[in-house]
Image (spheres, rainbow, N blue to C red):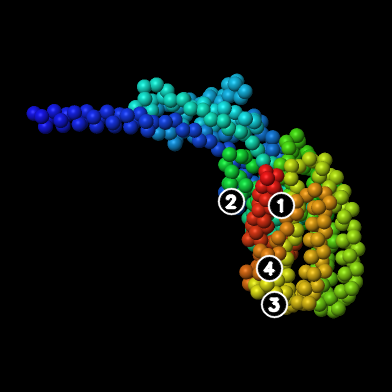
Amino acid sequence: MLRSAFVRQRRAFSVEILETRALLSSAAVISWKMAPQIVLDKAHGNAPDLPNTSAYVNPAGGYQVLLDASHSQGVQRSTTFTWTISESGQTVATVQGRKPEVTLPEGPYTVELSAKGLQGTTGPVVVDQSLVVKDVLIVSIGDSYASGEGNPVVNGLYFLKSAQWAHSPDPAMNLENAKAHRSTLAAPAQFALTLQKNNPHEAVTFVSVADSGATIAQGLLGPMPSNVDSSYILPSEIDEVRKIVGTHPIDVLTVSIGGNDIGFSTRLQQLATNSVAGIPSLSTIQDQVNADLATLPQQYAALGQAINSLDPGKTLITEYPDLTRNQKGQYAPIKLAGLSAISTSNVEFAAENILAPLNQAVATAAAANGWVAVDGLAAPFRTHGYSSTNSWIRNVGDSLRYENSIIGAFHPNAQGQHAIANRILNVYDQALAAVAG
């Protein structure tokens, strides 16, 4: 009898403990994230789209917030969730469900979650949390290194299949993207995509109006004929940015420009003919490079004034990667069809007398105009130049195969663009840390 009574008391005590634990373990938990603005498109190479429209940058009603109560404890089949979103004490939205979606303009909000029917509870369990709806707008301007030349989102196949470039649901912009050879495999787009993945509590919107073949005067500040179709005129990139973004503040503006202003592709052709026939002379090439370099400070200053009119939070200008070295980090000849097209000595000349001064001009322009220089690309590309067995640079054969022309040659491939994107991200993080510090 005594033993039975003891067992009954122990069972009752156990039940009481279990009920207390159930009550204590029941909790309403708020989780949330922003719906991504940059979305991979399976129908177009599984690459991000590039809408480049005002409606995309300034979505009606605001940005989609994904609420989530699935981490709540003690949830039963009968449990219900009610979300109340308020701004400055005023209710702006009420939604139901475990994972509802709500569209909100940018700004601070208070979210209240009321959970009814959690295990071990007799009334609603209410919690609240502050959140900030924020969109980071990243805009890319510049030349072919910014547009992603050499990297269609869907590769062509010689002249049997056309390449596809970044897709926009707007037909006119979709055509413009193709005429400008814009790709979301380009470093600025990949930088934006990584930033979105790294911080799910912020939306990231990406716009690129970079044009293959652009110079500062023709392309960024003024209109230019398409590099692939001279009958198609691309608008000024600065004007187009202003038209697309409207009143939305630009948080980050990435820039790549200067290579076409000193005729980089022409200098490569001259070095090729010099390698074979000795003309033009290296001194003639050097004089032309020096003359072009001398004009850059004034052109960068004009660009700086135009950029100031856009009032971006940060302007990041990238230097040009070194494409002159092989897998051993040594200067190596550039070959076409197995034959040397540019000699080793001329490749070294290009690195030291064209590329290095150009990157110095970029750094000087950054300091003069209050931009942040994205430098440090020499190290990652040191063993991945045009002649490397593990090249990060498109060769002529690749360009013919993937986009039915040689325009894509001497541009970073997808691996090279990722390396540049990583460097942009590092410099961006350092800039933010410096501001915070």
Which residue carries the number 2 mark?
A: 46
Q: Nearer the viewer, mark 1 or mark 4?
A: 4
Which tag, 3 or 1, sits closer to the chain's start? 1
Q: What residue type is labelled 3?
A: Gly
247 over 436 or under it: above or below: above
Q: Residue 161 carries which label?
A: none
Q: What element carries label 2?
A: loop
Q: Where is residue 423 in the image (x, y as percent from the top left)?
A: 67, 56
Name which of mark 4 and mark 3 comes first in the sequence.
3
Give the residue type that dot 4 points to.
Arg
Q: Is mark 3 on a helix, strand or loop?
A: loop
Callout 3 crowding tier (Cα within 10 Å): few <14, some 14–19, many ≥20: few
What amino acid type should be assigned to the residue bearing mark 1?
Arg
The disc label shown at residue 338, or none: 3
Q: In the rendered image, which residue does mark 4 sit on?
A: 382
How packed is label 4: few (under 14 Cα within 10 Å), some, or many (20 or more)? Answer: many
* Nearest the eye: 15 or 409: 15
Q: Identify the residue under disc 1.
A: 182
Secondary structure type for disc 1: loop
Dividing the picture into quadrants, the one containing residue 326 is: bottom right
Q: How far apart are marks 2 and 3 (CA)?
A: 34 Å
